[in-house]
Image (cartoon, rainbow, N blue to C red):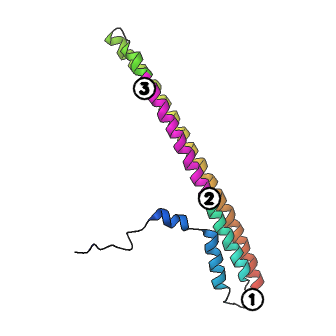
Amino acid sequence: MAKQTNPFFNVDASKFMADFDPAKMAEEFAKMASGYKIPSFDMDALFVGQRKNIEALTAANKAAAEGLKQVAERQAEILQDSLNEATKAFDVISKSATAQDAASKQAELYQTAFTKALANMQELADMVTKSNSEATEVVNARLTESLDEIKALAKKMK
């Protein structure tokens, strides 16, 4: 029996994204639509606006990706620090003279580790929030500008 492949599920997403060029897509769309003429409508202004939209989305995606990279790097640093602290903690506990002393040191270390973990989580949450805000600001600024452009085009059509 021949192996059947489904063209919808057999997609290499990394190749698809590597070939994805928003500016090229906008140019192709502009070429295709330039043959259609609508009286008293400025197609060139529309295409310029759409290109700006694509550029804004690309900038927002870059900001989000950079933020994700920074969060991942910080998580790796936190993991390394945690492993170092755990090694030190085991060393401290293992050198305890009595079980009571070990339990006391262990409780102290847990409290310190818990406080540090909360601070690390807050730091990571702040980093994600900042990254999201930066990406959102780019899109919001372009949206406002785009609405102004649409209003201007509408006034020209009257």
- What's the amino acid at mark 2? Ala
* Helix, strand or loop for disc 2: helix
Cα gap from disc 1 to disc 3, whole angstroms: 71 Å
99 sits to left or right of 1:
right
First in sequence, mark 1 or 3: give its number: 1
Residue that numbered label 1 is attached to? 40
Query: Does the magenta stretch mainly form a helix, a strand or a loop?
Result: helix
First in sequence, mark 2 or 1: give its number: 1
For the record, the magenta segment spans 59-87
Image coordinates for residue 93, horizontal then vertical, percent: 38, 16
Residue that numbered label 2 is attached to? 60
Q: Nearer the observer, disc 1 or disc 3?
A: 3
Observer-nearest of 111 and 46: 46
- What's the amino acid at mark 3? Ala
Image coordinates for residue 43, horizontal then vertical, percent: 71, 82
User: Compared with residue 156, is residue 20 higher up or lower down, i.e. above or below?
Assistant: above
Direction top: furthest residue: 97
User: Is 70 a magenta residue?
Assistant: yes
The quadrant in which residue 141 appears is: bottom right
Q: Nearer the observer, disc 2 or disc 1?
A: 2
The quadrant in which residue 54 appears is: bottom right
Residue 86's tag is 3
User: Compared with residue 25, is residue 139 higher up or lower down, i.e. above or below?
Assistant: above
**How many residues crowd around disc 1 within 10 Å: few (fewer than 14), some, or many (20 or more)?**
few
**How many residues crowd around disc 3 within 10 Å: few (fewer than 14), some, or many (20 or more)?**
some
- What's the amino acid at mark 1? Ser
Residue at left 58%, top 54%? 64
